[in-house]
Amino acid sequence: MRNRFRHAISAIVTAVVMGGLLAAIHQAAGQTPGPQGTAPQSRRTADGRPDFSGIWQANTTANWDLQTHAARPMVAQPGVYPDVPVLAAPVVALGTVGWIPPGLGVVEGDEIPYQPWALQRKRENAANWLDRDPELKCYMPGVPRAMYLPYPFQIVQGTNKIMMVFEFANAQRTIHLDPVEPYPSDAYMGHSVGRWDGDTLVVDVSSFTPYTWFDRSGNFHSDALHVVERYTPISQDAIRYEATIEDPKVFTRPWKISLPIYRRLEPNAQLMDFKCIEMVEETIYGHLRKQPLVKHWEGRTMAVDITRRVPPGEEVYDRLWSGNPEEK
């Protein structure tokens, strides 16, 4: 009897201690435990809505390619083996940095339902990525691409408006939660009107220009693009981002992407300047110089000739790789 009593007391003490430890862990993480089996509650605004204010960043390879992809050269040319591409001249000096990292796709079903003509255009875009990708020219990235670029962005949440400021190209967008007039023109970042569906922020985005892409793999749209976004809190520091994409001029049906976006937790997290306009002057206008810095242009396309300079002290390795036995 005494042993059973002692075991019962020990179990109660253990449960109390473990409960206290779990509560302490949640408090240390700045989270409020939810009901059993649920995620911690999200931060709330004064009116009870999830508070998305803060600095956020995606951690995926979606900006390289929305679909599942293996590692491949940024710019490729045939290698020794026909089915094994290697880096082409414009990026060959980058070595491993010139390769696109492999990644899992964020497209539902891993399929983008292009119309036949548009699929051909997508392939042409991918083959001419260095000439065509608007990101390389510092264009504002558009929606949804802005949400998964490899740069942080800041959300400033008010009662009637939510503002997003992106580090890349100083791009901005405003989500209107109050009634507003239709946008009078087209815009790179579109026109965003939002509403709350429980704890999910639903945003209807329209009035796009056709001059943005979805990623660096040539996925594109027309001016008929229509995007419906859903922002759902997973925890205080993570959002489930979903975007349903519709464009009857390019796709055969609507399709959807989904990925998490994370809060930057550094105590001094902030946006830094990435004013890329001046960074691309040579890329866009270099062929117009009286004395071009790039000596070989084919129209508006720069052709790069590679000359390898051997660093001092590495001549012996250069001889070893040259294949000349007399120099080894």
Image (tube, helix red, strand yellow):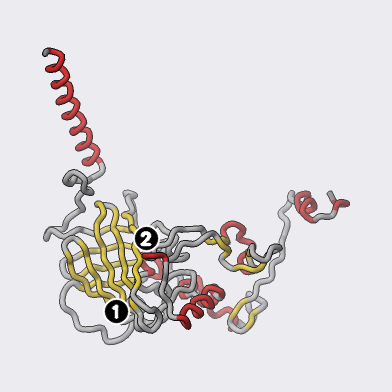
Q: Residues within 10 Å of mark 1 (few under 14, many from 20)?
A: many
Q: Position of residue 226 (x, y in %)?
A: 31, 78
Q: Report the residue at 31% width, 71% height from top.
A: 244
Q: Position of residue 275 (x, y in %)?
A: 43, 69
Q: Position of residue 285 (x, y in %)?
A: 55, 80
Q: Please tell me in which quadrant of the rendered image residue 191 appears.
A: bottom left
Q: What is the CA distance from the residue labelled 2 to the residue labelled 1?
A: 23 Å
Task: Find the residue positioned furthest to the right.
Answer: 326
Indicate which disc residue 8 carries.
none
Q: Report the residue at 22% width, 65% height from top.
A: 201
- The amino acid on which the numbered mark 1 sits, given as a three-letter code, is Ser
Q: Quadrant of the N terminus?
A: top left
Indicate which disc, 2 or 1, sits on the residue closer to the N terminus.
2
Residue that badge 1 annotates: 206
Q: Is residue 277 left or right of residue 239?
A: right
Q: Residues within 10 Å of mark 2 (few under 14, many from 20)?
A: many
Q: Secondary structure at mark 2?
A: loop
Residue that badge 2 annotates: 152
Q: Position of residue 21 (x, y in %)?
A: 22, 33
275 or 127, nearer to the observer: 127
Q: Is residue 84 above or below residue 218?
A: above
Q: Please tell me in which quadrant of the rendered image residue 165 appears.
A: bottom left
Q: Is residue 45 left or right of residue 64?
A: left
Q: Secondary structure at mark 1?
A: strand
Q: Report the residue at 41% width, 70% height from top.
A: 169
- The amino acid on which the numbered mark 2 sits, given as a three-letter code, is Pro
